[in-house]
Image (spheres, helix red, strand yellow):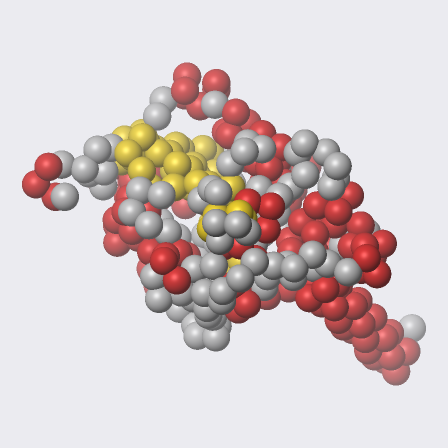
Amino acid sequence: MSTENTLEAKVSAATKRKEYREKKEETRKAFKQARFEEAAAGSEGSPSPAPESATPEAVELPRKRFYRQRAHSNPFSDHRLEYPRSPDCMNWSTLYPGYYDEEKSQMTAGVEIADVGCGYGGLLINLAKSFPETLCLGMEIRVQVTQYVEDRIIALRKKHAEDKANFQNISVLRGNAMKFLPNFFRKGQLSKMFFCFPDPHFKQRKHKARIITNTLLSEYAYVLREGGVVYTITDVHDLHEWMVKHLEEHPLFERLDEAWEKQDKCVQLMWNSTEEGQKVSRNKGDKWIACYRRLPTPDDCD
């Protein structure tokens, strides 16, 4: 194929991706499925139902090839993210319309499970089925990946509207957990936090960008209730040792043993639910897991 034809093919593919995503954007707006910038400012009122004209398209599951984006994102960059000033300013009704009581103008439940760096939402979908009465939130910093998960949830909600497990209990927002986690969650709000195949940041000068550090663990301990669990899994042994080291050194976390891991259904879910986990399995790679329980806060630290 000539250089000219190759260039023409690339331009054509880029145009198709753009048109596809623009079409999905219209569907998201029609369904009032909140993008993060719509939800975080604390707008009042409950979301309106989507028009019937949007229904057929929403049932179609999104095609991942139209949302491809680079695997990593710099967490220290200014991504023009919107975030609430405090958890009280966050309007969750646009993310979980099925859990909003219009008469009382309040949510009937709060988010309890957070999948930090949720990727394309594989674990989130499985959590929805395993914990149908618990609100689960995926946090993802990459724009197109977040949009893919939004579109996936919209399609699943419409497709399973009549089912008991209708995916109303999961949602996703674009956000940076390394900077703004306490802006979303109150003290002790979460029961589970997942860190599945995080960016290893191999170079030593990049280690400060890893999702598990002493400082960040203190923030995670703040939003995690006593007895809550931090779940980590990676295919990079050096990163596994790094996470274990920092969690072991932190006074508010205690490692759970292998016997506990074998009987916990969340460990089983995260083993192969994510796209990265499935890729590692296909390549017959190794996976390392470490789970830690949030210990009670000492009396003199309250």
Q: Is residue 195 above or below residue 264?
A: below
Q: Specify whether 91 is left or right of 243.
A: right
Residue at left 48%, top 23%? Answer: 264
Which residue sits furthest front? 103
Image spot of residue 204 (x, y percent):
35, 59
Q: Is residue 194 above or below residue 58?
A: above
Q: Which of 144 and 48 is in front in this view?
A: 48
Q: In this view, does 129 lie above or below 48?
A: above
Q: In which quarter of the image is residue 205?
A: bottom left
Image spot of residue 132 (x, y percent):
58, 33
Q: Which of 111 and 173 is in front in this view?
A: 111
If the image is split into quadrants, where does the C terminus sit?
A: top left
If the image is split into quadrants, where does the N terminus sit?
A: bottom right
Residue 13 seen in render: no
Q: How many marks?
A: 0
Q: Is residue 197 above or below residue 288?
A: below
Residue at left 60%, top 37%? Answer: 128
Which residue sits furthest bottom? 4
Q: Which of 297 and 161 is in front in this view?
A: 161
Residue at left 68%, top 32%? Answer: 164
Image spot of residue 63 (x, y percent):
78, 55
Residue at left 51%, top 30%? Answer: 266
